[in-house]
Amino acid sequence: NNLYFASFVSRDGSEYGLYSTDSLGSAIKWEAVVSSDIAGKQIDNLIVVNNTLLAATRESSSPNTYNLYYTTNGTTFSAVAALTDQPGAVVDAAYNSSASMYWVITGSKIFKGSGLSALSETKPLSVPVQGLGGIFYSSGFSRLFVSTKNGIIYSSGDNGTTWDRVYGDSVKVSGKEVPFGGFVQVNSSLLFTATDGYGFYKITGDITKDGYVSRFSGSTISELYNGVIINFHVDSTTIPSPVFICTYGSGLWSNTTPESDTGWKRSEEHTSELQSH
């Protein structure tokens, strides 16, 4: 429906909501989402998979409980029964188009189903105590990827029946396991994956064998090299397609030649905390 969504939480945590607009022009008009399932709730995460918006809500804080809702029209939201009153927030989601399968992860659980209303918990992997970081289906690699907070990236070419480690051992920096996050497809043979404090890593090569995982090498750009990556975005409306990286406290970065480690530029207008959905 060509809608853009944004969630907010006031600094003191007393106000929050979900808003939408149909234009990002010079005169943006945001309107509150009034669906009774979503209105007046704190939105912890917004994810888009298969033209469907997922909204993860925090239902209570003592103890923390979370729900997940979805919409295909931006107006009517439905609850995901398998993710109602969960103790952990939804971290990421993916849609495997080759198998028509949805995947959703919290920090400690994995769910899958042929539809969001049919999700159920599955245990295809041993989830580390540090938790899960991200999940992504790559059409370029024709594989499903899962990252963990203890430096492991898994991939599956059969929709989660069997899994391989993209990098044999936990990826470490100075003896510390790298906490991986979400993914983005840069081109048909290159993925980026986020980290908490180590910038981003690149995945390329023959994934069915050893694969190749390497850290962004621009160590002279310390804000990005050591950044906490919140989100990626590829602007596929232009050629070449620039990649945008949203960080926590280190600004918004972009590169029109993301295959190269040079060319990253930071927007000087917004260098404090940024978060996009």
Image: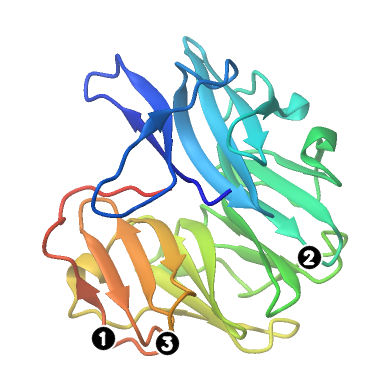
Residue 37 falls left or right of residue 103: left
Of mark 2 and mark 3, the one earlier in the sequence is 2
Instruction: Name the amino acid type tagged 3.
Output: Pro
Q: In the image shown, does 71 or 83 lie closer to the viewer?
A: 71
Q: Where is residue 202? Give x, y as percent.
A: 48, 78
Of mark 3 and mark 1, the one earlier in the sequence is 3
Instruction: Name the amino acid type tagged 1.
Output: Gly
Secondary structure of the residue carrying tag 2 is loop
Q: Nearer the viewer, mark 3 or mark 1?
A: 3
Secondary structure of the residue carrying tag 1 is loop
| Vertical position of residue 100 compared to residue 202: above or below | above
Residue 211 falls left or right of residue 24: right
Color theme of the render: rainbow
Q: Residues within 10 Å of mark 2 (few under 14, many from 20)?
A: many
Instruction: Name the amino acid type tagged 2.
Output: Trp
Asked whether residue 105 appears in the rendered view, the answer is yes
The label on residue 240 is: 3
Give the distance between the C-alpha atoms of the residues marked 3 and 1, in whole angstroms: 13 Å
| Vertical position of residue 93 compared to residue 176: above or below | above
Residue 55 falls left or right of residue 77: left
Q: In the image shown, does 40 or 85 lie closer to the viewer?
A: 40
Q: Residues within 10 Å of mark 3 (few under 14, many from 20)?
A: few
Q: Which residue is mark 2?
A: 163
Q: Where is residue 166? Give x, y as percent.
A: 65, 74
Q: Where is residue 174? Give x, y as percent.
A: 34, 68
Q: Which residue is mark 1?
A: 263
